[in-house]
Image (spheres, rainbow, N blue to C red):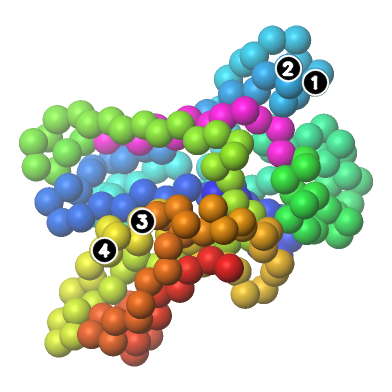
């Protein structure tokens, strides 16, 4: 997913875990496939490693966000956008600060995210990977919160039913999603359940994107 912040848009992925599935010394790798169609200055397709803000986790047991900043060095954006960023003292330019421009300047055909580590149960090596395509990107949305506390308990739990859900960001304009996109399971609407609490509030409100 592509998420927006104050100075830069962020490319973000999310991993979730439940009790009994803890991963020790977890490492997250983000590879991008760039082709001639997505990067006109390259003669052939190639894979590039994408730098993440936090690419390792000593004990992954709940939720992990992999974030990449779309800055002047990002291989995910166009040469033109990188030049405009560098000419703007390293900040994302105001004229590109909208969903249409962000999407217009994305330059990749697909990304592959791989997580490796050691199982806390078996002490054996584990690995999982997922490929995302350009059309999987949504701009101007955050991932829905997953952590909650059951009433009468202080223990944090993970709501796996929300793992692919997104909510529109409040501080920016999100791109319009068609009715077909809103019908996707990852963007479905959720009723509020007052018996569940978020980790940092008294009531949990599940929201869908707009």
The residue shown at (72%, 45%) is 103
Q: Which residue is mark 1?
A: 40
For marks 4 and 1, the one nearer the N-term is 1
Disc 4 to disc 1, C-alpha distance:
42 Å
- Asked which secondary structure carries label 1, the reply is loop
Left or right of 189, for residue 87: right
For marks 4 and 3, the one nearer the N-term is 4
- Asked which secondary structure carries label 4, the reply is strand
Q: Is residue 157 visible?
A: yes
- Which segment is the magenta one? 106-117
User: Depth-wise, is mark 2 or mark 4 nearer the camera?
Assistant: 2
Q: Which mark is residue 163?
A: 3
Q: Which residue is mark 4?
A: 158
Q: Which residue is mark 2?
A: 36
For marks 1 and 3, the one nearer the N-term is 1
Left or right of 206, for residue 168: right
Measuring from the top left, give residue 37's x and y in whole percent. Answer: 73, 21
Neighbor class of circle 3 (other Cα within 10 Å; few <14, some 14-19, many 20+) is: some
Which residue, as the protein is rendered here, is positioned at the far left? 122
For marks 2 and 3, the one nearer the N-term is 2
Residue 107 falls inside the magenta stretch = yes
Left or right of 192, for residue 96: right
Question: Mostly what secondary structure, the magenta segment?
Answer: strand
User: What is the quadrant of residue 49 in the picture?
Assistant: top right
């Amino acid at each position: 997913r592509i998420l927006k912040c104050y100075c830069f848009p962020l490319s973000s992925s999310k991993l979730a875990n439940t009790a009994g599935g803890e991963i020790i010394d977890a490492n997250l790798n983000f590879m991008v496939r760039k082709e001639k169609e997505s990067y006109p200055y390259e003669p052939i397709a190639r894979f590039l490693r994408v730098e993440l803000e936090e690419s390792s986790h000593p004990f992954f047991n709940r939720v992990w966000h992999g974030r990449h900043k779309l800055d002047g060095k990002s291989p995910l954006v166009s040469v033109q956008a990188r030049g405009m960023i560098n000419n703007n003292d390293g900040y994302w330019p105001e004229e590109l600060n909208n969903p249409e421009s962000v999407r217009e300047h994305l330059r990749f055909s697909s990304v592959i995210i791989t997580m490796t580590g050691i199982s806390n149960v078996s002490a054996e090596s584990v690995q999982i990977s997922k490929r995302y395509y350009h059309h999987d990107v949504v701009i101007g949305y955050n991932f829905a919160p997953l952590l909650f506390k059951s009433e009468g308990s202080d223990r944090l739990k993970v709501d796996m039913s929300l793992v692919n859900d997104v909510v529109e960001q409040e501080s920016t304009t999100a791109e319009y999603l068609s009715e077909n996109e809103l019908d996707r399971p990852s963007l479905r609407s959720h009723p509020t359940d007052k018996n569940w609490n978020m980790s940092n509030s008294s009531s949990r409100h599940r929201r869908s994107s707009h």
